[in-house]
Amino acid sequence: MKQHLGKIVLLILFTFSLYASSVKLEVNTPTIYKGDYAKFTIRASGNNIDFPTIKEIEGFSVHPNGTSSSINIINGNVTKTYAKSYVFKPDKEVTIPSFNVTIDGKIYTTKPKKITILEPQAATNGDPYILELKVNKSNLKVGQSTQLKILYKQRFDAKADKINISEPKIDNFWVKKLRDQKQYQEGNYIVTEYDYLIFAQKPGKFHIKPIIANIGKFVQRSISDNFFNDPFFNSMFSELKWKKVYSNDLAIQVEPLPNGLELFGDFTISATVDKKSVYANKPVNLTIKVEGVGNIDDVQKFDLNIENAVVYADKPKIESFLKNGEYGGIFSQKIAIIADRNYTIPPIKLQFFSKKENRIKTVKTEPISIAVIGGSTTTTPTTAKVETANGVQESTKTEPKVITKKVEVEKNPALKYILFIAGLLLGASAVILYNRFKNRGKRKKENDIIKRIKNTKDNKKLFDILLPYANDNEVIAQTLKALEENIYKGAKNKIDKQKLYDYFLDLEEQKRS
């Protein structure tokens, strides 16, 4: 009897608590590590519920994280319960304040809740899971690299069904993963090693924050324990529980390079052209190569300024490698140059801080002279001044002698006029035939260009087709500029091909006339 009486009292108290707690604030994460998200939920029961609008708590932005609902039936009364969740990321201890929730016209107030912030603590030797950061050098120069190792250690008797290790993200450092992980044994641990190269981008003292390993283990639910004892059913009735393991932190000192340099290492530079003699307004293709060890990825794009020439520079390509433990590679860039007169490609310079010589070093290419055939400055004078080692001499071009032969015509006036008219007709016919065949070839050439333009949908291919005509017309020049922005700057300029068709058709008509 006493047992039944106790159950009745508990039922009454439970029912009273359900009615009394129409609104409640629950903190899902009362204690978090610094850098983690905190989550809280407001639950309210009623038919018409108005939740508060929460945008920030103590200066930290708050974001909605989902809404759920359920139906409760108590003593024949049906009520709905709604739960609205929120997340935010505090970096210090905070108190979630009271919030007003309106339920069926009445205002209810939640109780304030505190969230405690813990500083991440690195695991120590003997723990089941250890995460460790190591660098080869902690004192660097700008542009210099060092090897960063992430060591994940798992004790032989520890279980881990899933492991997620965060990638290192270091402010003011460029990070490159070197290769796949490798495993080996170290005492009572199996060690998995991840290797990275980090390059210092700015001078100063930097703090590499701890990284996180999320260790997941399947934990059986009570239903599988009660009804089954089989691995298959155990896997069906289990859930993944996560444990966070933090690494140590690191400090790195970075010294500046003199003169504001950013390149560190040892490099060579070369420049080659596909031809040294070219027809006017046809491209010469220049290739620049930088090779060596160091932060090759920081070599900047070269831009040339050549008087009376149009220059188009491609986006550089970089092939990197790891040689004898040192990072390096090959930087290559192609540049097209178009001109209507002779020009010289000036020396191309590269300045860096030499690792071997411990000083600022400048390497450069030799100048390259390009002869332009048929350009605006190409002349064929009959008399020219030629500068020689002995002074200036006058050179005279010899004109060819024209040999004429006098032909006697009979003193017949009619025959004289007939021969004159026949000569005119033959001459006119020859000119017409010559122009027809000449224009047919030109027209075929221009029609081929229009056909190629119509069939090209790729910006780079169209750019290459139009490049030889860069100096011919403003429409071509503007189109090339728009194509260059599309190819190298991610622009989305619309190319009006009709203007190109009109230009080449007009050009054909001009040549025909």
Image (cartoon, helix red, strand yellow):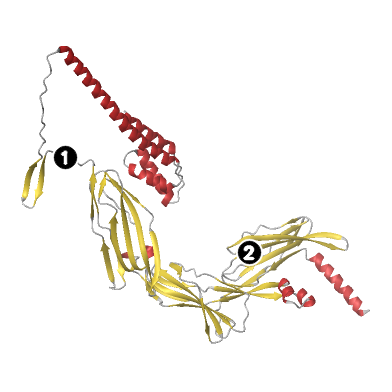
Query: Which comes sooner in the sequence, label 1 or label 2?
Result: 2
Quadrant where the N terminus sits is bottom right
User: In this view of the protein, can residue 258 be seen by the observer?
Assistant: no
* Residue 383, position as x, y percentages in the image: 10, 39
In this view, 309 is above or below 84: above
Number of the label disc, if any, that sits on residue 87: 2
Q: Amino acid at mark 2?
A: Val
Instruction: Kindly identify the residue that appears in the image at 35 percent across and 45 percent down.
Output: 467
Counting the numbered discs, the total is 2
Secondary element at tag 2: strand
Q: Amino acid at mark 1?
A: Thr
Rendered location of residue 19, percent (x, y): 81, 65
Residue 317 lies in quadrant: bottom left
Badge 1 density bin: few <14, some 14–19, many ≥20, Cα 10 Å: few
* 342 vs 254, nearest the viewer: 342
Q: Is residue 98 left or right of residue 268?
A: right
Say which residue appears at 43% left-offset and 70% top-offset.
198
Camera-side mark, 1 or 2: 1
On the image, numbered disc 1 is attached to which residue? 380
Return the mark for residue 445: none
**Residue that extends furthest to the bottom in the rendered view of this protein:** 187
Residue at the right extreme, as displayed: 1
Whether residue 97 is visible to the viewer of this picture, yes or no, is yes
Q: Position of residue 424 (x, y in %)?
A: 22, 20
